[in-house]
Image (cartoon, grey):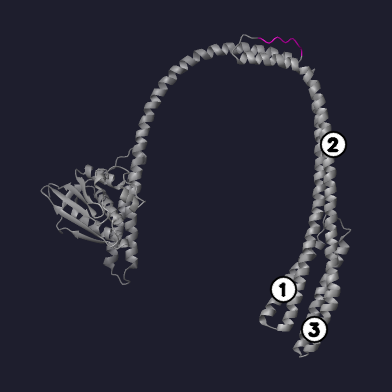
Amino acid sequence: MFRFRLAAVIIVSFSFVLFLGITLYWSSNQVARYFQRSQTAYETFDHYERLSQEAYRHFKQRMDGLIINSPTAQAGIEASKHRLYDAMQALRMTAVTENPTEGLQNKPAELERVAHFTAFLDASEYRFDEVERLRQQGKREMAVQALSKFSKEEIDEKFQPLIDTAINAEREKAGKARQELEDLVARSRWLALLASLTAALFSLTSGVLLLRGVRKPIETLLKGTDEIASGNLDYRIALDTRDEFGYLATHFNLMAQELTLQQDKLRESRLVLEKRVAERTFDLHRLNEELKRMDNARREFLADISHELRTPITVIRGEAEVTLRGKVNRNAEEYKDALHRIVELSMQLGKYINDLLFLARTETANLQFEWDNLDLAELVASAVEDFQVMAEENSISVSLDASTQSVWVRGDKQRLRQVLFILGDNACRYSKPGGHITVALWLGENEVNFSLTDQGIGIPDQDLERIFDRHFRSPNALLSRDDGTGLGLPMAKSIMKAHGGRITVTSTENSGSTFTVTLPLTLAEL
């Protein structure tokens, strides 16, 4: 049976793979062991190098300190002494730490060298202290002779050979470990190559034998799958063997028969489904258009609200900064007026936020109005104070030409304040530093007029009819300021239209602009 032949091949192949894996695992452990030994030798070598450098640096600092005798030299001696003993401590820790890859055969010699270094450093400190006492006692010649003798006999003849011997020993140990590592890698490479070649030869031989037994049945099955794939569901595979391929051919023929039945059912279901999809597609298209309309309305509303949140925030900040920068001894009324304006602007911001909440709940972009009778003269006067805060940054003056008499109109106070802020913000943004803004309020026959005149960049004649379009900005405005959105004036026009009023503009490029707002008076005012 084919399955038994295949199982035998798999078992033998698995054995080869297992042997190769064990070999590679053993080799990797050996490589890690020799690498660790080499790494330890190099670390010890580095510690000896550092000890040598720090020792000579400390000896030089002590000699210089004995000669110069300055506080700076003494500080350098202490610092070099700390570094020397840190290097000695690091070498001592390396020597006493047991390395499992190295064993214990080299530990006595290593510990003996460390002990010699420790004893020498302690003795050197004692000799340096002796020389220091001679110098302090005024025996400078004896101190110099003792220092010279110590340098020659102890440092040059004892310490230098001792440190050289240790460094050479560690260098030889590192070289030996590296050579052993390279030899092991070479042996592992040849062993892995031999095992791989053996496994490849066996796989090739067994593959050829298996291919001879399965080629004809596989060709027959492939031909049957090609016929079925091309749509010939009436084709049947003729394979009379009693092995797995014969079993597969029988079930393949049964599958083709079942597919024929399922295809007929699918053809009927597809016709029904296509009809339903066409109906649902029409409904979805209609709903999609409605969603697009609602989404466009919502995005426009969000853009308007985001644009308008900027101006009240600017005025609130300006009010606070002006109040803080002013004179120290302000009276309570001055602070009360500033806080009152900040509260009004905060209420305006709350109005905008409520519009956003309304939009989220009702899925529409229509602004809500709260109608009431209000004094437009008072509203304009309050807005002018806010303009003065915004204009102060660019040294722009603001004046108001209006009577103190109340002028009553019917409208939404916050929305009308929003219109005033839009006009005032534009005038402050596009006016030249040191310019002037004139605000005027006067009564007509059945209406009240409010105008704002600036000395800014003006609007080109060809753009006067387009400035109330959404997202439109004049080229000179784009050159002057790049942070605008073109949403303020369209929103102001929409608010005035809801109040039954209108907004107009006259302008001369590079000279300034005048925006005029007209509102109907209430019956009580008439």
Circles 3, 1 touching at the beta carbon (< 8 Å): no
State how far apart marks 2 and 3 are (Cα).
70 Å
Residue 191: image quadrant is: top right
Residue for badge 2? 194
Q: CA distance from mark 3 to mark 1?
A: 19 Å
What secondary structure do most residues of the magenta stretch adopt? loop
Where in the figure is residue 271, as x and y percent of width and height? 47, 14
Q: Taking the image as drawn, is residue 362 in sight? A: no
Q: Amino acid at mark 3?
A: Glu
Tags 2 and 1 in contact by the CB under 8 Å rule? no
Q: Position of residue 86 (x, y in %)?
A: 74, 68
Q: Quadrant of residue 249?
A: top right
Does the segment drawn in magenta span residue 104? Answer: no
User: In the rendered view of the protein, which quadrant contains the N terminus?
Assistant: top right
Mark 3 vs 1, N-terminal side: 1
Is residue 401 among the parts visible in the rendering? Answer: yes
Q: Amino acid at mark 1?
A: Ser
The residue stretch that appears in magenta: 236-242
Q: Amino acid at mark 2?
A: Leu
In the rendered image, residue 6, in percent from the top left (x then y), is placed at 79, 23
